[in-house]
Amino acid sequence: KTDFINFINDQEWKSIEPVSSWFGPSSFLMSSMSALFQLSMWIRHGHGYLTENLGIPVWGSYAIFGLATLFSGLILGLVSEAFGTD
């Protein structure tokens, strides 16, 4: 607490460079990181629902998410190939 008060009183904050816009909260990079974090939380909740509410074993939940990952990659690959240029 004392260090923070000294930081403010001594105006040490004026010597700190601002964060680059690349790392700002509204930048594309940080928005992407937020989306990945939200996806990981959705997967975690989905895993909990499958194992706790539906009674699927843990390995079954992993298999479901693994297959979903494989099929989504397959679909994205097919779509990108269909709309890609030669």
Image (cartoon, grey):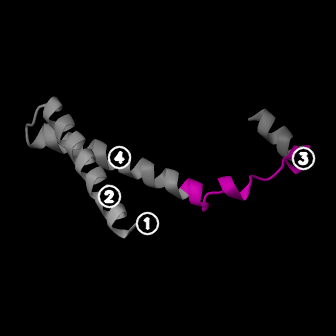
Q: Which residues are magenta?
A: 10-30
Callout 3 amino acid: Ser
Frontmost of labels 2 and 4 is 2
Q: Which mark is residue 76?
A: 2
Secondary structure under tag 4 reads helix
Of the image marks 2 and 4, the number of the one nearer the N terminus: 4
Q: Is residue 66 above or below residue 27?
A: above
In the drawing, does residue 23 fall left or right of residue 6? left
- Residue under label 4, please give it: 41
- On the image, the x and y values in percent for residue 44 come to 29, 42
Amino acid type assigned to the residue bearing label 4 in the image: Met
Residue type highlighted by circle 1: Asp
Q: Which residue is mark 1?
A: 86
The residue at the point 66 percent across, 56 percent down is 24
x, y (%) of residue 27?
Answer: 61, 60
In magenta segment, residue 26: yes
